[in-house]
Amino acid sequence: MSTNASQSSLSVPAARNLATATVTVPQWSAITPRWLHKLLPWVDVDGGVYRVNQVVTKPGETVEKQSALLTVDGGEPKLPTAFVNYEENPREYHLSTIQTILHTHTRVTDLYSNRIDQLREQVRLTVEAVKEREEWELLNHPKFGLVHEVAPEQQIKTRKAAPTPDDLDELLTLVWKKPAFFLAHPKAIAAFGREATRRGVPPPTVSIFGSPFITWRGIPLIPSNKLAIDKAGKTSILLLRVGEAQQGVVGLQKAGVTGEVEPGLSVRYMGTNEHSIASHLVTRYFSAAVLTPDAIARLDNVSVGEYHTYVYPKA
């Protein structure tokens, strides 16, 4: 039993290698910048439920028409009465949970934490794994993932498979009220760059968080490898408006939980068992909400495998 317990925690040889003749913390290539988390405004949710109250309108009807507004140029006409009707059964978003239990042997953390704190590094890497999973869920979760939250009227397809400036312009016609950023797989961004360059309009860049991003019409294209590419080399590009004040897309979290190391993410000590294995519970509470349908749009059928051969005139 002791052997099985130790196999679920950091091994002694691995800990010894980190503790001796090294000056670097563990390097993990799977860690990404997770720009989506940084660019989404986060809302603290009380009670674990976030309710989105929307105005009820008939197809093709505007709030102005529903409210029977009157423009007065003169005289004293009788003013119409008005009210804005709310949805009786608004959608509720419940926070999702990512959890794991981190095991560390006390012998390892006691003896092999000379230059680098073994427990701190184990917690850091586990938290990174949780955050990577969170970004994947924000995009792909079947209930609240942004890829699945796009209304049918907000979905379009590319004209010729490869993403062109025309296609991104079409997206901008769907999310034209303060669009914040495009979100795409790095290969999709590269494919758009090739198409724009081919047309003689190479996209300019902008610096965000100290990193360069290419833009279109002033809107940055933010990369995320959590947007899937299928076997045919096809993916999607999203365009978002963000923030509660803008009736956009927001992230949801519960701040102030026990053992919180950052808003909505906690690490709790669960005790040490008879095999000297210390356990820590790592938990992240989160979700995402689209406040109005026109806050997000999706470009489908985006091919990432289109390349061009350029023929230059001889000197």
Image: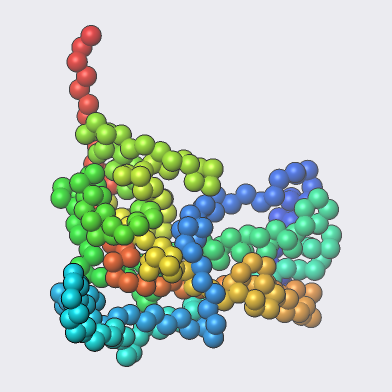
The answer to whether one can see residue 297 in this image is: yes
Please give left or right for residue 52 compared with residue 176 in the image. right
Residue found farthest to the top: 315
Please give left or right for residue 8 compared with residue 109 in the image. left
Residue found farthest to the bottom: 88
The residue closer to the viewer here, 108 or 77, is 77
Point out the image quarter for the N terminus.
Answer: bottom right
Q: Quadrant of residue 273?
A: bottom right
**Residue 167 coordinates in the image, percent (x, y):** 21, 50
**Residue 243 coordinates in the image, percent (x, y):** 44, 65
Q: Quadrant of residue 265?
A: bottom right
Say which residue appears at 32% left-offset and 64% top-offset.
296
Disc tally is 0
The residue closer to the viewer here, 229 or 149, is 149
The answer to whether one can see residue 101 in this image is: no
Q: In the picture shown, does residue 233 fall above or below 200?
A: below
The residue closer to the viewer here, 46 or 119, is 46
Say which residue appears at 20% left-offset and 12% top-offset.
314
Please give left or right for residue 28 compared with residue 118 in the image. left
Q: In the picture shown, does residue 187 fall above or below 249?
A: above
**Residue 145 coordinates in the image, percent (x, y):** 38, 70
Q: Quadrant of residue 216?
A: top left
Say which residue appears at 22% left-offset and 29% top-offset.
309
